[in-house]
């Protein structure tokens, strides 16, 4: 099956710990994205990458970091500097920037 | 804000009725996209309409774009209970460096 996968589905962490969310795609897409969704809110862009070994900050990058060492993988690290990390995190990819995006199933992160 | 604004925020209709959802924006766009999200899941792309297009169809979905009024509408005809979901418009603004901006979404409930 072609698609985009995120793991785990649910993640629990203690405050002060860094945590890495996985995102993998086998669609051969160049562009990948990370969004955060809070209850009753739309999606807010954290980071995006248009090509391997390159990425740009989105609207709410503070407290997050990413890497894009392989075309199919775009992991997101939520650092202890992120003040309110509890949220639903969505990864997406597109064949090129600006095209329709394909989303993973999401990871719900809870930090206590 | 470059965020699209959807209207209404919530819509409840009877199965078989049509559902119309609207999205307005403020600056010029390259394209506008509609997505659906079932509760707790990732988003699914529905339709992309480019700035030089006025109408597109996909099955029971019809999207219109009026660039003079800076607005778009999504019409779902003959709605089904399975259409119950949140619907988002996402805008690729001109010169946006390929970043999509999502609205806060419309919650559609279709009563059987």
Image: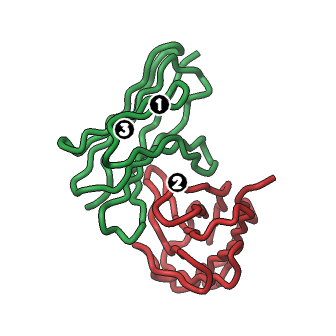
Chain colours: A red, B green
Tell me the chain of label 1.
B
Residue A10 visible to an observer of this rendering: no
**Nearer to us: label 1 or label 3:** 1
Horizontal and vertical percent for residue B66? 25, 39
Q: Residue at x 47, y 26 (%)?
A: B76
Mark 2 burial class by Cα count in 10 Å: few <14, some 14-19, many 20+:
many
Q: Does B1 sit left or right of B13 as displayed? A: left
Residue A58 higher or lower than A104, as above or below = below
The disc, 1 or 3, on the residue closer to the chain's N-terminal end is 3
B33 in relation to B58, above or below? below
Looking at the image, can residue B20 be seen? yes
Residue B23 lies, in percent from the top left, at 32, 42
Viewer-side label of 3, 2 = 2
Residue contact at pointers 1 and 3, CB within 8 angstroms: no
The disc placed on residue A100 is 2
**Residue A26 vs residue A109, the one in the foreground:** A26
Q: Which residue is mark 1?
A: B57
- Callout 1 and callout 3 share a chain: yes
């Amino acid at each position: 099956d072609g698609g985009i996968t995120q793991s785990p589905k649910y993640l629990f962490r203690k405050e002060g710990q860094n945590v890495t969310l996985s995102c993998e795609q086998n669609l051969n897409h160049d562009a990948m994205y990370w969004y955060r969704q809070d209850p009753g809110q739309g999606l807010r862009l954290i980071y995006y990458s248009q090509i391997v070994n390159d990425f740009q900050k989105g609207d709410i990058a503070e407290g997050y970091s990413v890497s894009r060492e392989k075309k199919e993988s775009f992991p997101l690290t939520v650092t202890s500097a992120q003040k309110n990390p509890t949220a639903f995190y969505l990864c997406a990819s597109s064949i090129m920037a600006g095209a329709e995006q394909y989303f993973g199933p999401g990871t719900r992160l809870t930090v206590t | 804000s470059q965020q699209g604004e959807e209207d209404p925020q919530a819509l409840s209709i009877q199965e078989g009725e049509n559902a119309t959802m609207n999205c307005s924006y403020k600056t010029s766009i390259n394209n506008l996209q509609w997505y659906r999200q079932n509760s707790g899941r990732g988003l699914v792309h529905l339709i992309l309409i480019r700035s030089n297009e006025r109408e597109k169809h996909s099955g029971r979905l019809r999207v219109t774009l009026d660039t003079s009024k800076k607005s778009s509408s999504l019409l779902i005809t003959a709605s089904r209970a399975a259409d119950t979901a949140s619907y988002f418009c996402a805008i690729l603004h001109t010169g946006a460096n390929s970043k999509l901006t999502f609205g806060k979404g419309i919650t559609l409930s279709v009563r059987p």
